[in-house]
Image (tube, grey):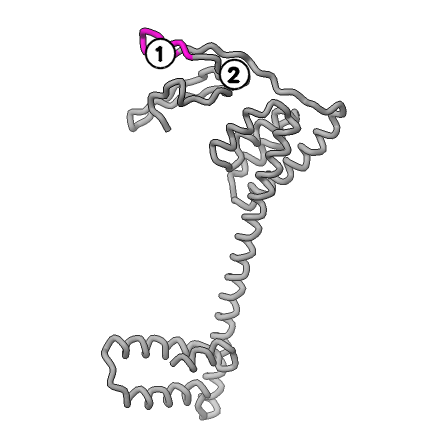
Amino acid sequence: DVDVPKEKDLYRIGVLARVLKLIDLPNGQLMAVVQGTSKCNLINMIPDHEQIDYANVVAVEDVVNTSVPEKLHVKVVRLTKMYTSILKMKNAAAELATGLSHIGSDKILINFISSHVDVPMAEKQGLLAVNSYEERVALLLEYLSGEMEYYKLRDEISDKARKNMDRQQREYFLQQQMRAIQDELGGSSPIEGDVEALRERASEKFWSDEVDAVFERELAKLQRMAPMTPDYTVQYNYL
């Protein structure tokens, strides 16, 4: 977030990158397309007289601690499945999920997911700072588990809201059918009797136009409800 960062503004762990392309944007800004080559540790900055900062860095290699590579592979398979499921829940671009299937290296998969996982920058920096692939996978699984729970809860709430909407629409449809049947039989529906009684009681009140508008709005809501539902009783008692 700092336009002209000083050494104190930089993380000590970073990535060496090769500039592949520079693109002039319509808004006058310059975008650089870069390719990471290795992780590094910042030793110190070397200011240049041309206002270009150089730095002394030391390359850092990530390691696999386990003596059995298959253990890490099993965790990476689980990580990939979890991340793919989250991408589907988020309706993310299909290219991301497709890209995962074409990565044949466990280490590259771990780093790819680390760079795309939806966590704050501080957490991403923490993933980069970890030198063990096993520890990085453990952190990713922790982050993704929390994210998956969030999207599952979101989908459950959406599903409940959709079912509730479907129920209200079904009740409204049945109510309209009941009214049609009552009209055919030449009778009146229970709702009409309740509405008429409430209107008679309302005619005896001396209230303001604002209160009258609220009453009419709530009365119209009552007319849209099915009389056999609990919501109808609650609305009627409220009126």
Residue 126 drawn at (x, y percent) = 53, 29
Residue 80 drawn at (x, y percent) = 63, 35
Magenta span main SS: loop
Q: Is residue 61 left or right of residue 31?
A: right
Residue stretch rendered in magenta on the structure: 45-53
Query: What amino acid does circle 2 point to?
Result: Asn
Residue that carries the numbered disc 2 in the rendered image:
41
Residue at (36, 76) in percent of width and height: 218
Q: What is the secondary structure assignment of the residue under circle 1? A: loop
Quadrant occupied by the N terminus: top left
Residue at (23, 79) in percent of width and height: 208
Residue 165 drawn at (x, y percent) = 49, 66
As drawn, the residue found furthest toward the bottom would be 186
Residue at (55, 24) in percent of width and height: 129
Q: Quadrant of residue 30?
A: top left
Residue that carries the numbered disc 1 in the rendered image:
52
Front residue of 97/137: it is: 137
Q: Quadrant of residue 196?
A: bottom left
